[in-house]
Image: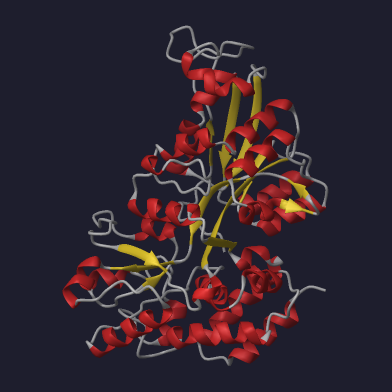
């Protein structure tokens, strides 16, 4: 599940404040803004010729992060004269479908589920990306990413923000005091878990409760383990149902995850035994680390927002994370993650210009300088990424050895990925047999 820890409050913000409409000038007479011939505007030369136009953008990004979005494209808007009207909604996925069906689609949407993107593309609602957008995306993103916004050979838009899910959170202070080293293999991870348990520290804390979405953190475990025991091609076959959901290789991955998640010696630090996992919220799942009640918590980069404000997230801080280590080194360096894709419902020139710009290195760096941002854009300069966990995420995404795969439940039909997969993982955590749980999911796959 592509989860972003953002408050659920919708509002509309203007992409640019005080914008004067004009073909070549795009600032107010008070001189606070820029004109197209300003030196700062030279980088936007290819987007000129669209002054006095407006582009609507709709997404799930809200509140403070929406303000950062507005700041990130403000200079582009000032220099090109394109006004960007942004709206963020807590009901984005449902309302986007309503708007599209009602003939009121936004010009651009940031869609975090490739399955939803695919559905709109198959229905003929999306406009294929322009040649300029496609060229920009191919220049700045790995093919692993672009496959998720390509439908029937047609490319619809580049990624925007990203998150990395293949992380294990820990306390650097605890590791130092206990004389532990960060594990670099699955065997080392298990040895560390055994050592912690022997020392009287419950190794893992886990929470998979998330309201109507309860169960999704457990699906991330399965996906990460499958990527580490099988090839990326097998993972792709699983998410597209080219192999059954209960293929023996998937059964093996679930059982391997179970050696941690269903092991009373390993879980659930600070909360109870295995059965407490289903009732522990994902937001609170890792917090016992700060009270030395557990040592490890597998969760995505966006979990950095869940630690108390006074907690310092850094390699020598109160809390940090390491890469979820490989199981079979021959499988490369798999990274599970998510992100949004910038797709268009209209192909007016100004819409294409905005879509192309959002795929550029200039945009990625503009947004990164404002903080709290991860992108797979290869032009992103690490010096602009100051947050330690964001920097670690970008380093992983830019590593040439990384094999990236998108969150599997977001790739599957909603009835499975956001339905039976979540539900059966809760039953499995609570004691249901692996074979029975996976058979139930398999039987729910739409014909």
- Single out the residue that lies furthest toward the front: 330
Query: Which part of the image, by quadrant, shows the C terminus?
Result: bottom right
Residue at image location 47% in from the left, 79% down from the top: 278
Residue at image location 32% in from the left, 80% down from the top: 269
Q: How many marks?
A: 0
Residue 67 at least partly seen:
no
Residue 217 at least partly seen:
yes
Q: Position of residue 144 (x, y in %)?
A: 62, 56
| Image position of 30 with respect to 244: above or below | above
Figure quadrant of residue 423: bottom right
| Image position of 196 with respect to 216: above or below | below
| Image position of 367 with respect to 327: above or below | above
Residue at image location 62% in from the left, 37% down from the top: 57
- Single out the residue that lies furthest toward the left: 177
Query: Which part of the image, by quadrant, shows the N terminus?
Result: bottom right
| Image position of 102 with respect to 228: above or below | above
- Single out the residue that lies furthest toward the top: 29
Q: Position of residue 284 (x, y in %)?
A: 37, 68
Q: Position of residue 400 (x, y in %)?
A: 51, 56
Residue at image location 56% in from the left, 91% down from the top: 432
Q: Position of residue 357 (x, y in %)?
A: 60, 32
Using the image as rendered, state which of residue 21 and residue 260 is in the foreground: 260
Using the image as rendered, state which of residue 340 and residue 375 is in the foreground: 375
């Amino acid at each position: 599940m592509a989860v972003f820890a953002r408050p659920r409050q919708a509002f509309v913000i203007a992409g640019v404040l005080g914008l004067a409409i004009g073909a070549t000038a795009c600032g107010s007479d008070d001189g606070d803004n820029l004109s197209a011939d300003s030196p700062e505007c030279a980088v936007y030369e290819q987007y000129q010729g669209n002054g006095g136009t407006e582009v609507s953008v709709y997404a799930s990004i809200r509140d403070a992060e929406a303000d950062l979005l507005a700041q990130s494209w403000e200079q582009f808007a000032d220099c090109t004269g394109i006004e960007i009207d942004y709206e963020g909604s807590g009901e984005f996925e449902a309302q986007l479908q309503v708007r599209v069906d009602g003939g009121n689609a936004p010009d651009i949407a940031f869609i975090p589920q490739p399955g939803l993107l695919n559905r709109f593309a198959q229905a003929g609602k999306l406009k294929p990306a322009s040649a300029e957008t496609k060229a920009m995306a191919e220049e700045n993103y790995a093919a692993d990413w672009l496959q998720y916004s390509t439908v029937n050979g047609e490319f619809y838009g580049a990624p925007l923000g990203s998150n990395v899910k293949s992380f294990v959170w820990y306390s650097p202070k605890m590791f130092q005091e206990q004389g532990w080293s960060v594990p670099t293999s699955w065997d080392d991870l298990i040895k560390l878990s055994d050592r912690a348990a022997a020392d009287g520290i419950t190794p893992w804390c886990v929470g998979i409760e998330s309201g109507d979405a309860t169960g999704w953190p457990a699906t991330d475990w399965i996906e990460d383990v499958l990527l580490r025991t099988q090839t990326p091609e097998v993972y792709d076959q699983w998410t597209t149902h080219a192999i059954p959901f209960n293929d023996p290789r998937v059964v093996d991955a679930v059982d391997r995850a179970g050696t941690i998640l269903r092991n009373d010696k390993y879980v659930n630090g600070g909360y109870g035994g295995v059965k407490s996992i289903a009732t522990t919220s994902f937001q609170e799942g890792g917090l016992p680390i700060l009270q030395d009640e557990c040592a490890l918590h597998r969760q995505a980069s966006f979990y950095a927002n869940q630690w108390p404000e006074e907690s310092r997230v850094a390699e020598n801080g109160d809390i940090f994370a390491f890469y979820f280590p490989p199981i079979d080194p021959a499988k490369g360096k798999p990274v599970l993650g998510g992100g949004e894709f910038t797709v268009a419902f209209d192909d007016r020139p100004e819409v294409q210009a905005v879509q192309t710009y959002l795929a550029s290195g200039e945009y990625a760096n503009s947004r990164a300088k404002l903080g709290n941002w991860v992108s797979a854009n290869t032009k992103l300069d690490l010096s602009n990424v100051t947050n330690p966990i964001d920097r670690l995420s970008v380093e992983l995404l830019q590593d040439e050895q990384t094999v990236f795969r998108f969150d599997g439940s977001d790739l599957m039909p909603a009835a499975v990925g956001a339905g039976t997969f979540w539900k059966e993982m809760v039953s499995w955590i609570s004691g249901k047999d692996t074979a029975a749980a996976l058979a139930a999911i398999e039987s729910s796959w739409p014909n």
